[in-house]
Amino acid sequence: MIFGEVLGLLGVGVVAGVVSTVVSLASIISYPALLAFGLPPLTANVTNTVALVFTGIGAAAGSRPELAGEGDRVLRLGPVAAVGGATGAFLLLVTPASTFELIAPWLIAMASLLLVRPPSGRVHGEHGVLGQVALFVVTIYVGYFGAAGGILVFAVLAAMIDHSAAKLNAMKNVMAGLANAVAALGFALFGPVDWGAALPLAAGFLLGGWVGPKIARRMPGHSLRHLAAACGLAVALKLGWGSYSR
């Protein structure tokens, strides 16, 4: 890639990394950018997932205050997210994406509506089977395609854990990061990753992921939850239009 393209992807990564940690929509910025730089859709998807690992690393470093005391919960829920991400990566590599693309707008819309409601007692508590199954399912989506996948993870965690939006956002970044990391490992070994695009994008994601939590913790009350819900509904409409208008 030429120097200008490298700088462009670095800038895209910074913006998308901030957006990812604040409202969980990195792929809505970075995936179209990779397409615009000439990558085929499958290559853009797996390259984006590999680079997104560095958003998780940056977000974890920037979210240390919110993650304090959450080690046991991360150890308990992290394996569920990791297995979900691995399952999603496997499905992407062995099946066509068209069916999942039709389902994704509905998943994102339902998750976005869930965000504006208080945590539901039906899956409240991370020890419950239903909550862990829900986390597994949404991290399959994160590993498979992942656009707005963080919104799904945020919604499930909000229904499982009675925490502030900032702490839930930090936990979401860790869970989605684990799912991305496992999926990225599979893509790095077996997928068509464009490393020339992945490396500058990853560097931008790392910086943006570190800055994002500083913005998120300054957002008052439930504004983060409502902003994520509004953005998620907009993404659902956009993806739905693209999937069903062909």
Image: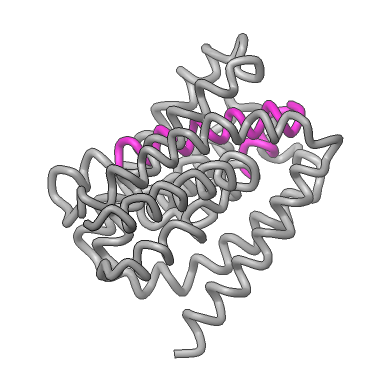
Q: Residue furthest top?
A: 69
Q: Residue furthest right?
A: 221
- Residue 134 vertical position relative to residue 141 in the rendered view, above or below: above
Residue at 77%, 31% (x, y): give it.
218
- Residue 82 vertical position relative to residue 97 in the rendered view, above or below: above
Q: Quadrant of residue 171?
A: top right
Q: Quadrant of the N terminus?
A: bottom left
Nearer the observer, 232 or 193: 193
**Where is residue 156 drawn, in percent x and y?**
61, 42
Report whether 199 appears left or right of 163: left
Residue at 49%, 48% (x, y): give it.
138
Report whether 44 appears left or right of 63: left
**Where is residue 203 drawn, in percent x and y?**
37, 38
Q: Quadrant of residue 65?
A: top right
- Based on the picture, tell me whether residue 37 belongs to the magenta stretch: no
Q: Residue furthest left?
A: 190
Residue at 19%, 61% (x, y): give it.
94
Nearer the observer, 37 or 222: 37
Q: Residue furthest bottom?
A: 246
**Where is residue 208 drawn, in percent x and y?**
52, 38
- Residue 14 vertical position relative to residue 94 in the rendered view, above or below: above
**Where is residue 64 drawn, in percent x and y?**
58, 16
Residue at 21%, 50% (x, y): give it.
196
Q: Quadrant of the C terminus?
A: bottom left
Q: Main secondary structure of the magenta part?
A: helix
Region rendered in magenta = 155-183
Q: Can residue 81 be seen from the camera position used here?
A: no
- Residue 227 vertical position relative to residue 125 in the rendered view, above or below: below
Nearer the observer, 241 or 157: 241
